[in-house]
Each structure stands twice: as structure tokens, then as C-alpha cells.
Amino acid sequence: MLPRESRREVVIPAQMRSKGGWSDVTIRNISPHGMMLLAPFPPKPGTLVEVHKASLALVGRVIWVKGKTLGIQLVERLNFTALFRAANEAPATGHGPVPATAALPFTGKHGSMIAWLLAGSTLLLASGCAAVALWQV
């Protein structure tokens, strides 16, 4: 049996999307391959979810639920730096991610066009990852 990965305790408000739609959640701990969340109405184990914090979107599967607490196994390894950077971005004005351009420091004549192209390709990549994850269900 593999040893359990170390956890890092955090308190990061975020949004989660599942079959039931969007809900506000709080990320309570993180590890390289998962996270524990507090949610008002946690989805059932086995459900695919997206967790959004500003411009960062994470895809995972609910592994366990206990009351309003749930554990998610992520599809890809969690980049702690990206999560902490997203946690310090301006909060979204509604559900879902802030456009990635909010975090890009491009200036100049072509800067905004490059930023929008990067934002679009990021969203396309995230959508593709989610589609692949859903296709495997």
C-alpha cells in the first residue's frame, strides 16, 4: 500500500460545478493529487466536478463524502503555485473562471490580442480535458 500524500491545510473560497450546477465551496486542504472541500450540497461519490478559483479550473472525481465535506481526486497533478496565484487574483463576479487575460501582464499594441488568444486556447484546452474525462465515464 502506498503511503498517504501529505496534505496542506488552506482556506480558499472557490466555485464548483457538477451535475447539479454551480455552488460556492471552500477548499480546506490540498495534496498533489486531490483536495478536500466544504460544500453546502456535496455531489455523490463518482461524480465528475470542476473546481474554479479565478482563472484556474481543476477537474476531478468525488471519491468520498461525509456530511458537507468531500474529497476529490484530481485528473492532473495540482500545481500549488498556480492555485495560490489564483487565490490572490480578484474574485469573479459570478460563477466560473475569470478570463485568463486578467492575470496576464501584456501591454502594447498587440498585447491584448495575444492575451485573448492565450485565454481562448486555455479555455479550449480545459474544455477538451473535461470532455475527455467525461467520455471516460
Image: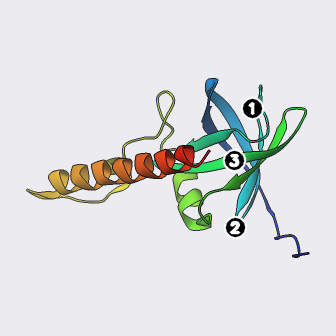
Element assignment for label 3? strand
Q: Going by the image, does 97 lie left or right of 53?
A: left
Q: Which numbered disc covers residue 32?
A: 2
**Residue lying farthest front?**
136
**Residue lying farthest left?**
109
What distance separates the C-alpha of mark 3 from that of mark 1? 10 Å
Mark closest to the chain's N terminus, 3 or 2 = 2
Q: Going by the image, does 89 lie left or right of 25?
A: left
Q: Nearer the viewer, mark 3 or mark 2?
A: 3
Task: Tell me, yes or no, whether the two marked residues, 3 and 2, touch with CB atoms within 8 Å.
Answer: no
Percent from the top left, x then y, of residue 39? 76, 33
The residue identified by callout 3 is 61
Q: Identify the residue at image location x=74%, y=42%.
A: 46
Percent from the top left, x then y, of residue 101? 32, 49
Q: Identify the residue at image location x=65%, y=30%.
A: 24
Q: Is residue 53 above or below residue 15?
A: below
Q: For mark 1, does the 10 Å Cα neighbourhood hold few (<14), some (14 to 19), or many (20 or more) residues?
A: many
Percent from the top left, x then y, of residue 40? 77, 26
The residue identified by callout 1 is 43
Mark closest to the chain's N terminus, 1 or 2 = 2
> Does any portion of residue 109 appear in the rendered image?
yes
| Kind of residue sitting beneath label 1 | Pro
> Does any portion of residue 89 appear in the rendered image?
no
Q: Identify the residue at image location x=64%, y=41%.
A: 48
Q: For mark 3, does the 10 Å Cα neighbourhood hold few (<14), some (14 to 19), or many (20 or more) residues?
A: many
Q: Going by the image, does 78 lie left or right of 66?
A: left
| Kind of residue sitting beneath label 2 | Pro
Q: Is residue 30 above or below residue 132?
A: below
